[in-house]
């Protein structure tokens, strides 16, 4: 009896298993019972965007949810062209290199022909990748993607997303795509661990924005992109007066930008605002030297930033360090044309500004307006302190060393007594040639610069037989640690005589 019972039980379990196996084969084929269908398009038809579908229910209980993509809207009759969900998934995995964490924008409807609007495909791919930790969005090489202003927002995103950029992304040149004006084109906000890397290009096509600038002399009916050797025709409508930054990161931690090229931004190329733990390496930034306000890298309210191995050519500061920045390390950077590496302008419109612990070293500058510069507005408050500029090689730079506490970008600015305090600024091994003036220290009457040190300064006029201007100092106090070329005898030794007044002012300006 025991043997008979066991045989019957075994037969029963085999029958149940066989029934489940059969139903798994039949269920995907029964469209009338709500099964999901995936179809191959006939040859010659345009292939639909393919993606994983989320299965809400099915045999055998809950399944692992795959990321949803665009849904096929037509349902052709079943036949030889039928493709199962498993085959669709396999195709996507093949396109993504066999990794289900990779989201290729082409699989989400991007055309990549440089003409069709690919914004929606990028938004959809981002929404999918955002739900998967350590995911990768793939922007493949060999394609050009036209993308309108877009924000990749991340408060609810999984951490450590990689934006693998090997193709080219271009900005629209139609005024209608920018409304009344936007501050940024591509923006990444509130992310934990975001990386953009690859060999691709982000092109702001900024020449259509620069044509109204008096410093950019291009015919009004067409603009020229020297980097592409192509003429970009302006839209019939005038571009907004507010020009966007090409690529901006805001409120993010653990940001990395590596290997890519940014070019022809309407305004600043790369901006970090309220970010921490930032690394920028081996990138290239380029726009014409007369393109207005096209900063290379702009930092604001950001800490623990490292920038290295980078080449920048632009129409404004190669690197601009603004208020709220500390622990900034810049090294092995090529700059020019442009306006050099600048801290500021700080204190505009009587605002408080704080910058500290900045090191800029092993930098080469060619044909720039200034070399290493600190610039502040009258009337501001706060402080700039603990700054190191070392191993700076300059070639045909107008003014290699500058502190300007009377900065003004207008024809006239009002004189004010309050100022951003500047102290502890060190210049070590600054060498090369200048075209206008070797050193310019213009410090506040009420709050002089203190703790300025100069060590191994060797600066010669491009025209060695003619020196237009010698070093200039006003209310600058510090120390010459070595002899300099030319001789900088205008730097005052020690501290200001009214040291108690300065101490009180510096105390009120403490950050």
Image: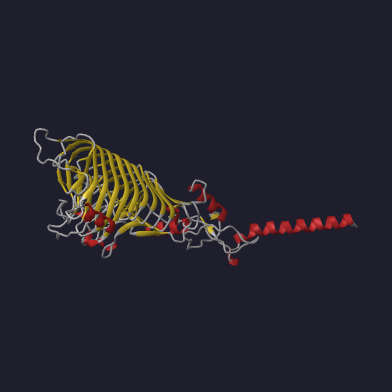
As rendered, which of 295 and 9 lies closer to the eye?
295
- Using residue 24 as the reference point, say whether residue 424 is left or right of it: left
Is residue 10 visible in this depiction of the protein? yes
Residue projecting furthest to the right: 1
Q: Quadrant of the N terminus?
A: bottom right
Of residue 79 and residue 372, the one placed in the foreground of this image is 372
Where does the image place residue 308, in percent across and percent down from the top left? 34, 42
Residue located 18% across and 45% down the image:
369
Quarter of the image holding residue 506? Answer: bottom left
Could you tell me residue 208's position as x and y percent? 22, 55
Report the residue at 31% width, 47% height from top: 358
**What residue appears at the point 37 percent right and 59 percent down from the top-left corner?**
151
Q: Position of residue 437 (x, y in %)?
A: 14, 42
- On the image, the x and y values in percent for residue 67 come to 51, 58
Which is nearer the eye, 228 or 35?
A: 228
Nearer to me, 228 or 327: 327
Q: How is the image coloured?
A: secondary structure
Query: In the image, is 40 to the left or to the right of 19?
Result: left
Split into 4 quadrants, where in the image is the C terminus?
Answer: bottom left
Residue 45 seen in the figure: no
Residue furthest to the top in view is: 465
Marker count (numbered): 0
Q: Is residue 397 above or below residue 104?
A: above
């Amino acid at each position: 009896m025991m043997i008979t019972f066991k045989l019957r039980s075994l037969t029963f379990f085999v029958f149940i298993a066989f029934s489940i196996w059969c139903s798994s084969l039949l269920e995907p084929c029964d469209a009338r019972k709500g099964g999901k269908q995936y179809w191959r398009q006939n040859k010659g038809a345009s292939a639909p965007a393919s993606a994983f579908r989320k299965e809400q229910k099915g045999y055998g209980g809950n399944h692992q949810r795959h990321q949803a993509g665009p849904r096929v809207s037509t349902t052709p009759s079943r036949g030889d062209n039928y493709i199962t969900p498993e085959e669709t998934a396999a195709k996507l995995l093949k396109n993504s290199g066999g990794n289900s964490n990779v989201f290729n924008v082409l699989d989400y409807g991007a055309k990549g022909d440089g003409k069709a609007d690919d914004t929606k495909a990028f938004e959809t791919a981002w929404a999918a990748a955002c739900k998967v930790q350590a995911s990768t969005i793939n922007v493949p090489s060999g394609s050009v993607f036209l993308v309108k202003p877009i924000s990749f927002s991340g408060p609810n995103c999984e951490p450590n997303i990689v934006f693998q950029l090997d193709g080219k992304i271009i900005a629209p040149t139609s005024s209608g795509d920018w409304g009344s004006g936007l501050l940024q084109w591509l923006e990444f906000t509130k992310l934990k661990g975001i990386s953009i890397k690859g060999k691709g290009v982000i092109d702001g096509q900024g020449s259509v924005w620069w044509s109204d600038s008096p410093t950019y002399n291009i015919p009004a009916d067409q603009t020229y992109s020297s980097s592409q050797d192509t003429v970009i025709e302006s839209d019939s409508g005038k571009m907004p007066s507010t020009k966007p930054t090409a690529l901006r990161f805001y409120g993010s931690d653990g940001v990395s930008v590596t290997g890519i090229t940014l070019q022809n931004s309407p305004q600043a190329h790369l901006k970090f605002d309220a970010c921490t733990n930032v690394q920028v390496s081996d990138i290239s930034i380029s726009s014409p030297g007369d393109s207005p306000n096209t900063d290379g890298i702009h930092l604001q309210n950001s800490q623990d930033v490292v920038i290295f191995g980078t080449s920048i050519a632009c129409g404004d500061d190669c690197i601009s360090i603004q208020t709220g920045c500390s622990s900034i390390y810049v090294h092995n950077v090529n700059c020019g044309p442009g306006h050099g590496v600048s801290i500021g302008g700080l204190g505009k419109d009587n605002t408080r500004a704080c910058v500290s612990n900045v090191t800029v070293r092993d930098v080469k500058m060619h044909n720039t307006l200034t070399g290493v510069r600190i610039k502040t507005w009258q009337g501001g408050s706060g402080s700039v302190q603990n700054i190191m500029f070392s191993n700076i090689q300059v070639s045909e730079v107008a003014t290699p060393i500058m502190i300007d506490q009377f900065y003004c970008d207008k024809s006239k600015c009002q004189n004010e007594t309050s100022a951003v305090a500047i102290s502890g600024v060190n210049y070590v091994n600054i060498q090369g040639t200048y075209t206008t003036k070797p050193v310019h220290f213009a410090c506040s009457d009420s709050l002089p610069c203190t703790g300025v040190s100069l060590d191994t300064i060797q600066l010669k006029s491009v025209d060695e037989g003619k020196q237009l201007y010698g070093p200039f100092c006003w209310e600058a106090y510090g120390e010459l640690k070595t002899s300099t070329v030319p001789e900088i005898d205008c730097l005052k030794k020690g501290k200001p005589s009214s040291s108690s007044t300065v101490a009180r002012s510096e105390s009120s300006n403490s950050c």
